[in-house]
């Protein structure tokens, strides 16, 4: 039987699913590094899960807010229809 999740756990899982969904959509348009954004999101969540103490609510809430800002930025970029930016070294 599963234990009920706290509100903070539900928020983290919702953010994780949203970021994975956005990463999956972004990777579908990529040509060179398919799956790299999806892998990056998974790795970052795993790293934070291992390095942040479960009772450090301030750090968890900080990371949650940061992730939500990152997701909003991805949504804004997606809505602006920007796929990539390339820099040129030509004068």
Image (cartoon, rainbow, N blue to C red):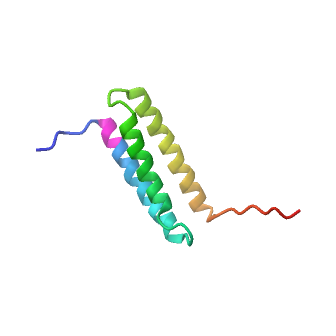
Percent from the top left, x then y, of residue 24?
45, 63
Along the line of sight, which residue is nearer the eye, 73 or 87?
87
Percent from the top left, x then y, of residue 16?
39, 49
Q: Quadrant of the C terminus?
A: bottom right
Query: Does residue 87 appear left or right of residue 79 in this picture?
Result: right
Image height check: is 20 above or below 5?
Answer: below
Q: Which residues are magenta?
A: 7-11
**Residue 20 picture quarter:** bottom left
**Residue 29 picture quarter:** bottom right
Image height check: is 78 above or below 16?
Answer: below
Magenta span dominant secondary structure: helix
Residue in the picture at 38% in, 28% down: 57
Which residue is farthest left? Answer: 1
Please check the rendered image and state whether residue 56 is part of the magenta-colored stretch, yes or no: no
Query: Does residue 16 appear left or right of residue 69 in this picture?
Result: left
**Residue 82 picture quarter:** bottom right
Query: Does residue 40 appear left or right of residue 3 in this picture?
Result: right
Please check the rendered image and state whether residue 10 is part of the magenta-colored stretch, yes or no: yes
Count of numbered marks: 0
Percent from the top left, x then y, of residue 72?
53, 49
Percent from the top left, x then y, of residue 8?
33, 36
């Amino acid at each position: 039987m599963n234990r009920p999740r706290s509100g903070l756990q539900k928020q983290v899982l919702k953010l994780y699913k949203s970021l994975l969904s956005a990463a999956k959509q972004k990777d579908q348009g990529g040509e060179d590094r398919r799956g790299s954004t999806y892998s990056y999101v998974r790795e970052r969540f795993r790293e934070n899960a291992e390095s942040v103490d479960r009772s450090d609510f301030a750090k968890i809430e900080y990371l949650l807010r940061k992730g939500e800002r990152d997701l909003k930025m991805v949504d804004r970029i997606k809505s602006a229809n920007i796929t990539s930016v390339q820099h040129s070294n030509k004068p």
